[in-house]
Amino acid sequence: MFFTFAASASRRVVSNWTKQKVSSVRQFSSQQFFIVNSVGLDRPGIVSDMTGVMDKAGCNIGESRAVKLGNHFSVMMLVSAPKEETTSSLTEQLKVIDGLTITTFETSDPKAIEVNPQTGWSGQFKLSGADNPGIVYKVTSVLSKNRLSIESLQTTSEDAPFGGTTLFKMEGVATVSKPLPKSFNIVSVQEELSALGDNLNCDIELSPSDDIS
C-alpha cells in the first residue's frame, strides 16, 4: 500500500507520489537533465555516497526526495549534468555504490516547462482511520470518476494507541483542469467521499485550497 515516490528527505516511514503535467518544453540550457532513482537496503551514508558521485561527475542536484520504506531506503533526484553525460554513463558511475539498484532517465529543463492545461480547481484530501484492503484504490477511484487529478499523495500507517489495530492516514492534493466540466460538483464529491469513509470506518475530507490554512 506504499508508493515509492517520497515526500521529503526526512527518514520517516512515509510515501508520496507527485507529478507535473506539461504540454510543451523549450530547450535553452546547455546542460542535460536527468532523474536518478535508487533503492537499496538502508544503511548510513547512502545519500552521501550518491551526492559524492554526482559531484565528481560535475552534476548539480536540484529537487530531491528520499524515504525509508520497511528496511529499504529510496532516493530520487533531479540533476543537471554536462552535455556529454548520458543516462548510461551516469548510471555506470553510480554503480560503484554497493547495494543500490539505480535507474536514470533523461528529462527536460524544469525552467523551460510550460504547464498546460491550467488548474481550474484545487483542493486537499485527508483520510484517517482503520486500515482496509484497497482503501487507496477506493478513494482515488472516487476522485478519478469525478475528473479530479491527483497531484501529490502521501500515506502513513501506525499502530493505534488502543485496541491493537493499524491506523492509516492519507493526504494529498487533487485538481481539476480548466475549463471545469459542467458535471463537476464539489459538494457531490465530498458527500461521496464521506459516505465511503462511513463504510470504511474512517474520516475522509476534501477541502478547496482557499479553505486550507
Image (spheres, rainbow, N blue to C red):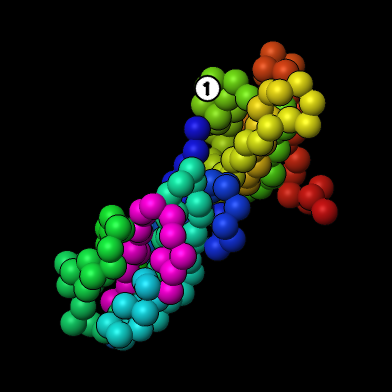
Q: Is residue 44 left or right of residue 31?
A: right
Q: Is residue 92 above or below residue 158?
A: below
Residue 76 location (% of width, % of height): 42, 61
Residue 35 is covered by the magenta coloring:
yes
| Magenta part of the chain | 31-48
Q: Which residue is mark 1?
A: 134
| Front-lying residue, 126 or 108 | 126
Q: Can you tell which quarter of the image residue 180 is in?
A: top right
Q: Is residue 101 left or right of residue 46?
A: left
Residue 188 location (% of width, % of height): 71, 24
Q: Is residue 182 left or right of residue 75?
A: right
Residue 125 location (% of width, % of height): 68, 39
What residue appears at the point 63 percent right and 24 percent down from the top-left corner? 131
Q: Can you tell which quarter of the image residue 103 is in?
A: bottom left
* Quarter of the C terminus within the rendering: bottom right
Q: Is residue 28 above or below residue 42?
A: below
Residue 57 location (% of width, % of height): 27, 83
- The reply to whether residue 153 is visible in this rendering is yes
Q: Residue furthest top?
A: 199
What residue appears at the point 63 percent right and 44 percent down from the top-left corner? 172
Q: Is residue 177 left or right of residue 35?
A: right
| Front-lying residue, 181 or 8 | 8
Residue 104 is covered by the magenta coloring:
no
What residue appears at the point 30 percent right and 85 percent down from the top-left corner? 56
| Front-lying residue, 77 or 119 | 77
Q: Is residue 2 above or below residue 137?
A: below
- The reply to whether residue 113 is visible in this rendering is no
Residue type highlighted by circle 1: Gly
What residue appears at the point 69 percent right and 45 percent down from the top-left corner? 123
